[in-house]
Image (cartoon, helix red, strand yellow):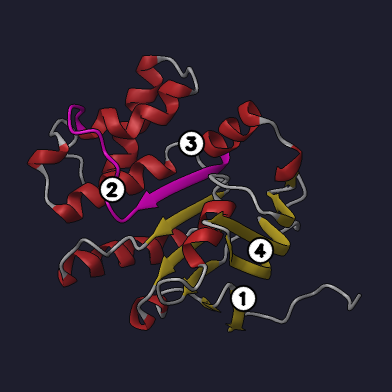
């Protein structure tokens, strides 16, 4: 794999929805390149297109127009099974609502992506325990989400996102359901992940939270309005 290639290389992304005879253009020609090891915040109000963009970057949705290459793989060329494999192995998701299974313990939740990947039980348990230690939950790994605080649940979600060593971590309003102290602790974990060389893209509507990232990309009406990162490297058409 070419380590110099960007993790995200999206060009001319358009996403249209048709409802009741009306066409809604949620994305309107978005270009975005994210290099390996960057920590990027996608900022925007409700309806700006940031959540739609995150869904496309996470291979949960596909653009109406445009191209998207993730870690060197052209996403539009993949079938359903290949997309599922990319989501499992290349992307780690962290959601505002945690998306943990309450009937499972923390260690079982973290190990779940490895279970889907048919990793032997002993190995996935060992790797999940190690990831929970990394996020400071070694003493809570056998507790269910209902026995954990919101901040602890989000730590479990981060450990789960990291368990497959993905090329990209996508975080959707990761502090949205947390108090200020727990939110600050979660943002500190993301800063540490960035310092370790992880590639992180975080969606937020809050400028203060966005400042945690090293680069801020602001969206409005489905378009990129500003980007604090370097200018696009593509030559003019």
- Whether residue 111 is situated above or below residue 43 in the rendered picture: above
Between marks 3 and 2 in the image, the one whose residue lies nearer the viewer: 2
Q: Earlier in the sequence, mark 3 or mark 1?
A: 3
Left or right, 209 with respect to 59, comes to: left
- For mark 1, what is the residue? 223
Give the magenta part as a residue range.
Answer: 90-105
- For mark 3, what is the residue? 164
- The foreground one among 23 and 5 is 23
In space, the residues marked 2 and 4 are separated at their CA atoms by 26 Å
- Work out which residue is located at the far front of the displayed protein and give it: 21
- Answer few, some or many: residues within 10 Å of disc 1's Cα (few below 14, many 20 plus, some between 14 and 19): some
Q: Earlier in the sequence, mark 2 or mark 4?
A: 4
- The foreground one among 229 and 47 is 47
Residue 98's mark?
A: 2
- For mark 4, what is the residue? 35
Secondary structure category for the residue under label 1: strand
- Work out which residue is located at the far right of the displayed protein and give it: 237
Q: Is residue 101 magenta?
A: yes
- Answer few, some or many: residues within 10 Å of disc 3's Cα (few below 14, many 20 plus, some between 14 and 19): many
């Amino acid at each position: 794999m070419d380590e110099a290639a960007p993790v995200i290389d999206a060009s001319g992304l358009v996403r249209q929805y048709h409802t009741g005879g009306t066409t809604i253009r949620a994305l309107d020609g978005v270009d975005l390149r994210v290099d390996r090891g960057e920590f990027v915040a996608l900022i925007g109000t409700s309806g700006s297109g940031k959540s739609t963009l995150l869904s496309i970057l996470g291979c949960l949705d596909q653009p109406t127009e445009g191209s998207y290459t993730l870690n060197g793989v052209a996403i539009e060329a993949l079938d359903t099974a290949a997309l599922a494999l990319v989501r499992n192995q290349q992307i780690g998701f962290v959601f505002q609502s945690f998306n943990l299974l309450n009937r499972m313990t923390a260690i079982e939740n973290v190990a779940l992506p490895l279970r889907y990947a048919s990793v032997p039980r002993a190995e996935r348990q060992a790797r999940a325990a190690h990831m929970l230690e990394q996020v400071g939950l070694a003493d809570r790994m056998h507790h269910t989400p209902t026995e954990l605080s919101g901040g602890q649940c989000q730590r479990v979600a981060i450990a789960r996102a990291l368990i497959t060593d993905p090329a990209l971590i996508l975080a959707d309003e990761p502090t949205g359901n947390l108090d200020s102290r727990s939110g600050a602790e979660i943002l500190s974990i993301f800063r540490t992940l960035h310092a370790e060389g992880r590639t992180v893209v975080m969606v937020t509507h809050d400028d203060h939270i966005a400042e945690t990232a090293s680069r801020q990309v602001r969206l409005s009406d489905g378009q990129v309005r500003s980007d604090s990162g370097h200018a696009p490297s593509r030559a003019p058409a």
